[in-house]
Amino acid sequence: MRIYFCGSIRGGRDDVTLYRRIVQKLQSYGTVLTEHVSSTDLTDRGEDASAAGDKFIHDRDVEWLQQSDVVVAEVTQPSLGVGYELGRVVVMKKKTLCLFRPSSGRTLSAMIRGADNGEQFVVRDYSEDEVENILEEFFSTLKRT
Ligand SMILES: O=c1[nH]c(=O)n([C@H]2C[C@H](O)[C@@H](COP(=O)(O)O)O2)cc1CO
């Protein structure tokens, strides 16, 4: 299974430790195409775009989105890139799980929460300590469908 993980990069790296934990769990279900998003070496400047440029990053990521079987996004830290990716996957009709932590004190964008249709695109509120269980639940329902 090919999994696309979305997490904030230029939007801020506050949650990178949690991204790492999510990606480690996701790797028990398949190949995570965007493992770099969870790298603690990656700062809020993003990948070194000097060689290939932002167009390379964009085009590669859209290609990976197209190739993916499932998309998991941590959406607590607001990120334009993650919002854009989610907009694209809605159109691609990919099975998508968005994870949001209300304990952050933030209110999730209506354009993400409001896109929940209970099937293809699901938004789930959670706390950090339950993340592995939520992913287990999500992937076990996938197997049944
Ligand atoms: O260097 C990058 N590499 C990369 O893969 N992305 C993609 C993956 C992330 O899920 C998302 C993060 O967007 P943003 O940088 O706007 O927070 O965009 C984004 C950047 C920088 O914008």
Image (tube, rainbow, N blue to C red):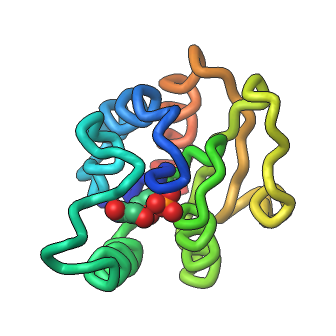
Q: Nearer the viewer, residue 121 or 17?
A: 17
Q: Residue at x 39, y 79 (%)?
A: 62
Q: Which x, y percent locates residue 74?
A: 56, 44
Q: Residue furthest left?
A: 51
Relative to residue 56, is residue 139 drawn left or right?
A: right
Q: Quadrant of residue 66?
A: bottom left
Quarter of the image with the C terminus is bottom right
Q: Which x, y percent locates residue 21?
A: 39, 27
Q: Residue at x 73, y 28 (%)?
A: 104
| Quadrant of the rendered image holding ligand 1 | bottom left
Q: Is residue 99 visible?
A: yes
Looking at the image, residue 65 lies above or below residue 127: below
Looking at the image, residue 41 lies above or below residue 114: above
Q: Quadrant of residue 129?
A: top right
Q: Which x, y percent locates residue 138?
A: 56, 41
Q: Residue at x 29, y 34 (%)?
A: 40
Q: Residue at x 21, y 62 (%)?
A: 48
Q: Residue furthest top?
A: 129
The number of discs equals 0
Q: Is residue 1 visible?
A: no
Relative to residue 133, is residue 9 drawn left or right?
A: left
Relative to residue 127, is residue 41 drawn left or right?
A: left
Q: Nearer the viewer, residue 117 or 53?
A: 53
